[in-house]
Structure formats: C-alpha cells, structure tokens
Amino acid sequence: MSFDPASYIFTQPSAPTAIRASTVLPAHRENVELRTSDGHRLVGELALPESGEIKATLITLHPLPTHGGFMDSHVYRKASYRLPALAGIAVLRFNTRGTSSPRGTSGGAFAEGIGERLDVEAAVQFAVDRDLPNRWLVGWSFGTELALMYGAAEPVASEIEGAVLLSPPLHRATDVHLKEWAQAGKPLKVLVPEHDDYLQPAAAATRFALVPQAQVIGVDGAKHLWVGEKYAGRVLNEIVDEVIPGSAGTVLPPEWDGPVATAHA
C-alpha cells in the first residue's frame, strides 16, 4: 500500500518543540504522479506551505537507486518535513524510473542516467503545470548528474532558475555538461563534503572552474551521505540561502512553536 502523507497525526505541544530528524511540520502534502513522454508513471509527493506565498520550489533528484537512493533519502525527506513551514518552500520529491519507496514504485527500469532525462523533464513540467514559482533543481549524488546533464538543456533550462548540487561525483556528467551550464549562466551552488568518497572540495573546485558562476562550498567534517543532523541542517540552510532572494545568512530555527507530527522510519 502506498504511504499516505495525510496519515500524519499532528498535536499541539504545550511548549516549542525541538526539530529533530523525525519531526514533521505542517504542510499541504499530497501524493502525485508524473507522466514521462515515453509513457512511464513516476510516483512522488508534493509538500506545499499551508498558507502564504510560495517563495521557491525544489525539484529534488535523488541518489543512485541501485545503491539505495530514492525520494525518501534523508535530506529530501527532512526538506519536505520542514521547508514548507519554515521557509515557504514547495518540495517535490519523486522516484525516478524503476525506483521504489514507501510511496510506491515508479514505472520503467533504471536507465543509467540516460532514460532519466525524461524523468527530469516530467518533474519540471509537473511543477510548471501546477504554477509552482521560482523552480530549482536540487540534485544529490546521482541526482547531481541528472541536474548537470539535463538542467542546462531545453526543455528544462528555460523553466528553472538554477541548481543546488549535493555531493557531485562527476562520473556521468562531463566537461561538456559543465560548459553548457557556463553558457546558460544559471546559478549553480555546489556543496562538497570534506570526506566525500568520490569528489572532494579541492578537486571539485578544479572541475567546476569551467562554470564561472558556480559557487563551490566545501563542508568540513561532512561525508557523501550527509549523515547527522548537523550536516543535514547545514544543507537545508544552504538551499534556502540560494533559492530565496535576500535570504543569505538566514539560519532555519531549531524549534517550532505549533502543531507537530512524528514520522516513523
């Protein structure tokens, strides 16, 4: 059975609640389906602010599904739990073709990052069709390859503002793709863990030098999977800084004074 985001049970604590890994803040959450141009049904979830302006939209691209990556990979799950309430940000998560999660299984089969081009296009088109504003790709690991390979090319490029990359391995994405981003001129923020398994900050700075507008940020102590609340929180702050104009230096609050729910692993 597919997980229903409406099943969260919210209660009103008597005092502000510390935001932890499993803390879910209020949002309008719905299960969604994306349709690719080659006929596949991709399952996902859209989390929107309960009220007020949608300040930005994150279209998240998850880590490698053959190594456990999916729409619930922890940084994206926490983004959907927190950012609609704390920052007015819409978060679209989905499983690329052939990927399974508690939400369900997307149609098709893993395509080594080639067929997934159509998944990226479908996700961006969904956000456009829903009139979600200020759209950004957020890629993590394998997801950064998809963002780099397809984000600066049409039909995606004209529909997004830029991209935020977490732990880019630069295995599938090549200098050709980096040069496309350079030519597009769209913002590219690159968060690189100090102890990454594939590409560490110094090497990343060299590779991304091909993109003059790329901002490469090494994160001391972090590893490829951003394990630990300290590092997940840093990622979410960096995303907010990038996608919301005028928010530079903003730190998301560690507590919430309102209804909360608890997610179960």
Image (cartoon, rainbow, N blue to C red):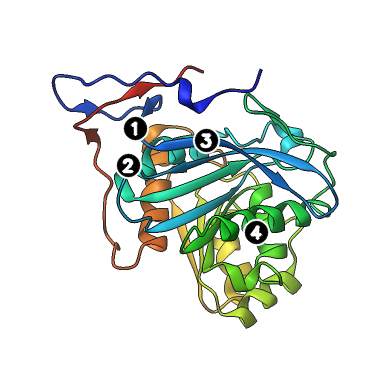
Query: Which numbered disc, 2 or 4, marks the residue closer to the eye?
Result: 4
Considering depth in this image, is 218 or 146 the residue closer to the camera? 146
| Rendered position, 24 above or below 125 | above
Relative to the observer, which residue lies in front, 104 or 6? 6
> In the rendered structure, which amino acid carries the disc numbered 2?
Ala
Q: Is residue 74 above or below residue 150?
A: above
Given the image, on which type of amino acid does mark 1 rest?
Answer: Leu
Q: Quadrant of residue 170?
A: bottom right
Name the residue at 65% across, 35% down: 70
Looking at the image, is mark 2 or mark 3 earlier in the sequence? Answer: 3
What separation in Å lies between label 4 and label 3 (alpha carbons)? 17 Å
The amino acid type of the residue labelled 4 equals Gln
| Residues under numbered marks 4 and 1 in contact, where contact means CB atoms less than 8 Å apart | no
Residue at the disc numbered 2: 85
Do labels 4 and 3 touch, CB within 8 Å?
Answer: no
**Residue at the spot of label 4:** 125
State the residue in front, 249 or 60.
60
Q: Residues within 10 Å of mark 1 (few under 14, many from 20)?
A: many
